[in-house]
Image (cartoon, helix red, strand yellow):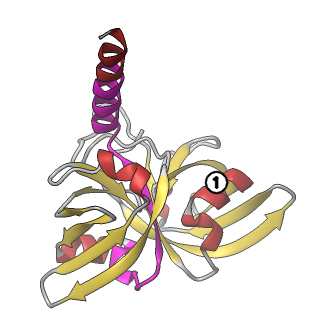
């Protein structure tokens, strides 16, 4: 589990394609690898991955990404020298500054509008219609692993309003039109809506 508060940006230094999976090697400040153990969970662009090898002193960590994950997230599109969002897993006693995030990406969105000024950033993301019932204005959503508040909602997507701090610490400040962006819906919102839909459907059948 994660908080959706990205800790830093890591650099993709090596990509090795193997049979049925891809090995990513990332370079990151050594302090973010302190007390890391093999098998630990780390969110990369919001995707929960398992650390398969690392050197905390040298500041690098490896992940094996299976074909399913490569197909359903934007990790299949990352390239060497590209930066990615990095968050260690939630530990007991950690502050939850965002919302609880699982690292299980449901879909990707496409950045279709981008407006920046010296203080703020406006983004409009297009999302498949099947996911829109679970995206509510002022609700939580995880975008590239960042816990964010949804702005205006449209039939085919939603808006984000980002502050300079978010743009500086995360890769959202590097996004370009047409980019594929990982989306994790708020699990609580999704569960409530699905439960209500199921109950209403059962009542309809009983009438």
Q: Quadrant of the C terminus?
A: top left
Judged left or right of residue 47, residue 22 is right
Residue 73 vertical position relative to residue 48 in the rendered view, above or below: below
Of 206 and 148, nearer the camera is 206
Of 192 and 21, nearer the camera is 192
Q: Position of residue 30 (x, y in %)?
A: 49, 63
Q: Position of residue 170 (x, y in %)?
A: 35, 70
| Residue under label 1 | 69
56 part of magenta stretch: no
Residue 143 vertical position relative to residue 37 in the rendered view, above or below: below
Residue 174 vertical position relative to residue 29 in the rendered view, above or below: below
> Which residue is found at the position 15% from the left and 80% from the top?
120
> Which residue is found at the position 35% from the left and 22% from the top?
201
Judged left or right of residue 101, residue 19 is right
Q: How many marks?
A: 1
Q: Is residue 147 visible?
A: yes
Judged left or right of residue 39, residue 152 is left
> Which residue is found at the position 17% from the left and 54% from the top?
137
Q: Position of residue 113 (x, y in %)?
A: 31, 82
Residues drawn in magenta = 171-199
């Amino acid at each position: 589990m994660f908080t959706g508060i990205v800790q830093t940006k890591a650099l993709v230094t090596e990509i090795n394609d193997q049979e049925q999976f891809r090995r990513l090697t990332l370079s990151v400040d050594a302090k973010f690898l302190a007390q890391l153990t093999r098998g630990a969970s780390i969110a990369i662009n919001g995707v929960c991955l398992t650390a398969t090898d690392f050197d905390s002193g040298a500041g690098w960590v490896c992940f094996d990404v299976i074909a399913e994950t490569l197909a359903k997230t934007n990790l299949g599109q990352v390239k060497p020298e590209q930066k990615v969002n990095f968050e260690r897993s939630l530990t007991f006693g950690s502050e939850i500054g965002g919302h609880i995030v699982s690292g299980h990406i449901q879909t990707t969105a496409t950045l279709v509008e981008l407006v920046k000024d010296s203080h703020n950033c406006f983004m409009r993301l297009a999302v498949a219609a099947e996911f829109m019932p679970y995206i509510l204005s002022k609700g939580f959503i995880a975008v590239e692993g960042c816990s964010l508040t949804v702005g205006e909602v449209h039939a085919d997507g939603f808006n984000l309003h980002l502050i300079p701090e978010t743009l500086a610490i995360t890769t959202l400040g590097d996004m370009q039109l047409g980019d594929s962006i990982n989306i994790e819906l708020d699990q609580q919102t999704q569960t409530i809506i699905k439960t209500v839909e199921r109950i209403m459907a059962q009542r309809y059948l009983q009438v």
